[in-house]
Amino acid sequence: RSGEGAGERWMSSMEPGATHGVWSSETTCVTLKPMTIQLQEFGEDFLQISWSRDAEAFDYEPEPHVAVVQSYELHIHEMDRDGTARSDAPDAFTLDRTFPADVCKLKVLDLKPDTVYTVQARACAGKDNRWGKWSPPVKVLTLAMLE
């Protein structure tokens, strides 16, 4: 048997002729908002970023069963001006790195001037090390070299 109502779906399975038992106690499940990337500083050949969950995601008191972040994964990729990845180009900058949970910022050096880079992060959480969704991509254009 299944049904829908007020933004929810439900399904139950019973043997024919069986009756429902008592309801279980209520359990609250909270899903966290996506990761966010903050651009702190950038220049001709560097960028400094930090990553975190949206502060509004923590407007509740965490329960003991809430998954704890174990690590973060960060992607920084060089892009063409039209927004396509330059992953096929042998000289394209790519950084794919995992960081421990206590590291939430990075200064990246030796970038190309006047070049677009895209940055994304995601968190690995829980006892079973499940990866969350990638943050929305943040595009950064390094400054052009002064002549």
Image (spheres, rainbow, N blue to C red):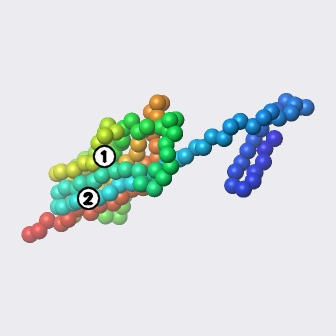
Tell me where residue 105 appears, x and y as whole percent.
27, 48
Q: In this view, does 46 lie above or below 66?
A: below
Task: Specify the label residue 104 is tagged with.
Answer: 1
Tell me where residue 112 appears, x and y as whole percent.
19, 57
Give the total of numbered labels: 2
Which of 103 and 99 lies nearest the eye of the viewer? 103
Q: What element does badge 2 sit on? A: strand
Tell me where residue 5 appears, x and y as whole percent.
75, 53
Q: Is residue 141 visible?
A: yes
- Quadrant (top left/top right/bottom left/bottom right) for the C terminus: bottom left
Q: Which residue is drawn at 26% across and 58% down?
A: 40
Relative side of 119 to 129, left or right? left
Name the residue beneath numbered marker 2.
40
**Quarter assignment of residue 114:** bottom left
Q: Can residue 85 be seen in this view?
A: no
Which of 110 and 12 lies nearest the eye of the viewer? 12
Q: Residue at x 49, y 46 (%)?
A: 61
Label 1, residues with CA under 10 Å away: few <14, some 14-19, many ≥20:
some
Q: What element does badge 1 sit on? A: loop
**Quarter assignment of residue 23:** top right
- Quadrant (top left/top right/bottom left/bottom right) for the N terminus: top right
For the view shown, which residue lies furthest in the left direction? 147
For the view shown, which residue lies furthest in the front direction? 61
Kind of residue at disc 1: Cys
Kind of residue at disc 2: Gln
Residues under labels 1 and 2: Cα distance?
12 Å
Relative side of 142 to 70, left or right? left
